[in-house]
């Protein structure tokens, strides 16, 4: 059972606190790629092994296909921002919010618009060659 207060679960309250710390840390570091890489590596290392494998491969795909995106953390999860500092895509560990699967998500700033309706997050349970190809395509589109 998830403990809640004022509408937020303990996990959600913890995530809000972590995000506030991230914002303070970002203000100190500025738009520093090295600091972002370290933060993302730390976030991935803290994930359970199955999620870390997925997040690590997505990190490599972003570096390969959209090197212009800046690595950072967002609610203590790996994320990648455009030149304006807006998060374009992120990875959410299943363990973080006690969900069934790791998620690859895209913000409203991602260039994925496709008609009247399109997906903004994908459950990822395994990185196969076909999944890797699809993720690379999404990264390229999202980055614009």
Image (cartoon, rainbow, N blue to C red):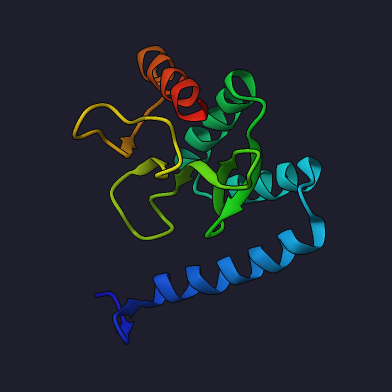
Q: Where residue 118 sits: x, y (%)?
A: 24, 33
Quadrant for the N terminus in the image? bottom left
Question: Vertical placement of 90 versus 63: above or below?
Answer: below
Nearer to the camera, 64 or 85: 85
The residue at 56%/23% (across/down) is: 61
Q: Can you tell which quarter of the image residue 134 is in? A: top left
Residue furthest left in the image: 116
Residue 54 left/right relative to 4? right
Residue furthest bottom in the image: 6
Q: Can you tell which quarter of the image residue 23 is in? A: bottom right
The residue at 53%/40% (across/down) is: 52
The residue at 59%/45% (across/down) is: 44
Q: Where residue 82 sits: x, y (%)?
A: 60, 38
Nearer to the camera, 112 or 23: 112
Question: Vertical placement of 44 versus 53: above or below?
Answer: below
Q: Where residue 4 sits: x, y (%)?
A: 31, 82
Numbered disc total: 0
Question: Vertical placement of 86 versus 17: above or below?
Answer: above
The residue at 66%/25% (across/down) is: 67
Q: Where residue 63 sits: x, y (%)?
A: 64, 25
């Amino acid at each position: 059972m998830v403990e809640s207060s004022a509408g937020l679960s303990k996990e959600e309250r913890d995530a809000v606190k972590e995000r506030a710390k991230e914002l303070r840390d970002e203000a100190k570091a500025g738009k520093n790629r090295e600091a972002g890489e370290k933060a993302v590596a730390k976030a991935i290392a803290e994930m359970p092994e199955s999620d870390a494998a997925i997040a690590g491969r997505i990190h490599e795909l972003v570096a390969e296909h959209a090197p212009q995106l800046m690595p950072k953390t967002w609610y203590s999860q790996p994320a990648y921002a455009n030149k304006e500092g807006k998060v374009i895509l992120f990875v959410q560990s299943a363990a973080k919010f006690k969900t069934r699967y790791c998620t690859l998500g895209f913000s409203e700033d991602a260039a994925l618009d496709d008609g009247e309706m399109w997906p903004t997050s994908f459950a990822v349970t395994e990185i196969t060659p076909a999944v890797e190809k699809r993720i690379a395509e999404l990264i390229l589109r999202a980055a614009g």
